Every structure is written in C-alpha cells, then in structure tokens.
Image (tube, grey):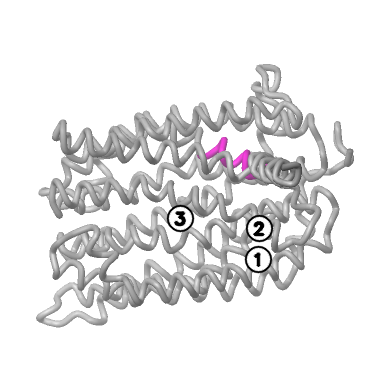
Amino acid sequence: MKLLTAKLKKLLHAISGLFGPVDMTVGTPWKKIVLFTVPMLLGNIAQQLYNTVDSIIVGKYVGDNALAAVGSAGPIFNLLLVLYVGISVGAGIMVSQFFGARNREGLSYTIGNSILLTLFASIFVAVFGSLATRPLLQMLNTPDTIIDWCASYLYILFIGGVGLAFYNILSGILRGLGDSVSALVYLLIACILNVFLDLLFVIQFHMGVSGVALATSIAQIVSALLCGLRLYKMKDLFDMNLHYVKWKRRYGMNVIRLGIPSGVTQAIMSMSMIVVQSLTNSFGEMFIAANVIVMRVDGFAMMPNFSFGTAMTTYAGQNLGAKAYDRIKTGAKQGTIIALGVAAVITGSILLVGRQLMGIFTETEELVELSMHLMQILAVGYLAMAVLQCLSGIMRGAGDTMTPMWIAIVQTVVLRVPLAYLLCFLSTTPELPNGRQEYVIFSMLISWVIGMLLTIFFYSRGKWRTKMLVDPEQSGGGRR
C-alpha cells in the first residue's frame, strides 16, 4: 500500500510539473526540447482546427463556393495579424532571456508592456481591418459569387480579433517562461467550444460563413482569458499588476525592436500570399477551393516545424540568458534531427492517406484529385522547412531577428512570387491561357528549399551569437 501511495504521489508530482515553467538551462537538451515541443505542437494543431473546422463545416453544409470564400479571406486576415506576431515574438524572446537570467523586474516590465502594446494593436486592427476589407477583396479580383461572403467573414474576425491578439501574446509569454502545457489545455477547451458553436450557428441558425467567424472569435476570447488568469497566478516568477502595465520605454521598445523583423516577415509572407491569391483566383473557383484544402492540410503538416522552431527560440533564449553557451549548439543539432524525423513521417503519411484527408473537406471527386495532386508536389518541402524553422528559431532566441527576416524576403519576394507568375506564363497554351495551375504550388516548394540553404549558411556563420539582448546583471539580474 505504501509503495502504491508513493508511486501515486510521484505520478501526481510529474503531472503537476507539466503545468509550470520548463527550465531549459539544465538537463539533457533534446529531452527538454521535446518536453516543451509536444504540448505546444498539440496546441498548434488545436489552433489550426479553428480554420479547418470552419472549412469542413462550410464545405459540407454551405457549399464549395463558401469554402472558397473562407480561403480567399485568409491571406487578408493574416496580413493584418502581423502586429500580433511581432509583439508575440518580441515578448517571447525577452521573456525567455530574462527568465534564464532570473531577472524578476525585467520579466515583470516586459510582460506588462507587452499587454499594453497588444491592447493598442487590437484596436488598430479592428478599425483598419474593417475599413480595408472590401477594397482589398476588390483589388484581388475576388469573384462576385463569393465576395460578400468573404467580406462578412472578415468583418467579424477583425472586430472580434481582440481574443486572438491576447491569446497569441499571452501564450507567447507562457512559452517564453517554458510553460507550453497550460496554453495547450486552454486552447483545447476553446477548440471544443469553437466546434460546438460552429455547428450551432451554421446548422441550427443558418448563419453561413458569418457563423463560423463568430464562433471562432468567441472561442479565442475564452482561450485568451484563461491564459491571462494563468499568468496572474505565476507570482513566484514575476509581478503582474498595474504598476508594470504602463509604458516603460526600455522594455516596450525592445519588444517592438525584436518583434518588427518577425512582423515584417509575416507581412511579407501574407503579402506574397495575397499577390499569389490574385493569380490563384484567375484559375477559377475549383482551383481556389483546391488551394484552400491544400493550405488547410499544409497548416497541420507544418505545425511540427513551427513548434520545433518556437521551442528552439525559447531554448536559445533561456540558455543565452543563463550564459550556458555550450548547450545551444548541442540543442540545435539534437532538435533539428528530431524535427527532420517528424517531418519525414508526416511527408510519408500525406503521400499514403492524402486522398482520405482531402475527402474530409469535400465530396466532389474532381476537387479531391486536384487537391491531392497539388499536395504531392508540396509534400517533400516539409523536410526543408524542418531545418529552416529550427535554425531560424535558434537565431531568433539569441536576439537576431533580422537574419530570418532577410531570408524570408529573398524566399518570398525574390523567389516565390516571381516564380509563380513566370512559370505559369511560360506554360500558357491555347488550351491553358493562364498556364499550368500546379506551378503556383511548385514555386512554393522551390522557395522553401532555397530558404533552407540560406538559413544553414547564415546559422553556420555564427554572427547570431553576438546579438544577445538581456544582460543578466541588469536590475534584479543574476541567477538565484
């Protein structure tokens, strides 16, 4: 009985340990990276479910044109999320370095200023996004059959985007502290709520694409509130009160300075998607819908790469803050190898069961076959993105957010967009006046591979090691 009680206590202690910060400055690097990555990966998959469930329900219960409308709205919505991405990345890097340095005051001011910046950003996005929605849709030559659906979907998401804004930033802070489990639990709760509300609004109330947008907004607000409550209770690590939620130039500007390159990167990627979306729209509703399906599957396939990249950012930040420089190189190698293995499994799975995945979104056989053909072109690129994301994560965690930004510019502006248009133009025939539509996807694969090669080159040069932002001896600094 005593042995059973002891084992039970040990199990409960292990479970409770998951719901707290992971100190990545000690222990076996790859184990800490995996321990941090797995719950974050599950959380990212849950996050992706928001859009995927929207697409499935809209495609099944409203129609293929409604599915195309949701997909066409995506690039515009993502473009205006760059402020959230920038604040989240900047805050996460500073939090991880201050946590590694055991700097309580710096940690408190960073979190407070990040919350303040998020409030301003969410107000701006709500106002500007609502005003710019229809002009942007018209500029992209969105088909008349779906433009009203696109507009109503975006209006609701922009106005209700405060939940997404605060979830992204607060969960980014939790990850910087090494706590990826709490955000997972809260997001799973919100995801279940999102599915329930999707079904209620679309099937019961017949609200169409507006219903799925409203369901997503409500669910995101719930996840943001839960993350905020979790941070409020972490008083052993930092102070969260109004004294710290006021502008402090040194901390607020550092969040902006670190976040701007990542925000610019996201903006460039979103702009490239918008420009390519115009090309995509020229092929008609069938290709638009196929592209939506591919991007939804791609969203899940890319999640491990993004998760490992974020884990490497936290890992590098904490170890730099703790001046544990030798651990960074070891962790980078081990984490990248694991990420490659996961990407290989995903690529193989897509090639084996891809048609079944496409069939979840639509019952139109022609659409399933077209989507699978596009996915087969893209699949091998996930191996390249595994390397790119891991090594970029290390550079960002060290405070070098500029190098990944420049690589993204080359990858998208110099390669992806021109290649998409050039390849389609060169393949035009009387039967195919717009060219071969699969070249839109093929251009993405080429840009991923070249982006990986550039990332390996700049990581190997090692200049990112000189970019550390936080001095462990700053106010409150030094390891306790």
The magenta stretch spans which residues? 168-178
Q: Find residue 279 and report its image quarter.
A: bottom left
**CA neighbours of label 1 inside 10 A, class few (<14), some (14 to 19), many (20+):** many
Residue at the spot 72% in from the left edge and 26% down from the top edge: 235
- Residue behind mark 2: 312
Vertically, is 114 above or below 75?
above
Disc with the residue nearer the chain's start (2 vs 1)? 2
- Give, as a three-letter code, the residue at label 3: Ile
The N terminus: image quadrant: top right
Residue at the spot 26% in from the left edge and 81% down from the top edge: 426
Determine whether label 2 and label 1 are within 8 Å by CB.
yes
Residue 443 in sight here: no
**CA neighbours of label 3 inside 10 A, class few (<14), some (14 to 19), many (20+):** many
- Give, as a three-letter code, the residue at label 1: Gly
- Residue behind mark 3: 268
What distance separates the C-alpha of mark 2 from that of mark 1? 7 Å
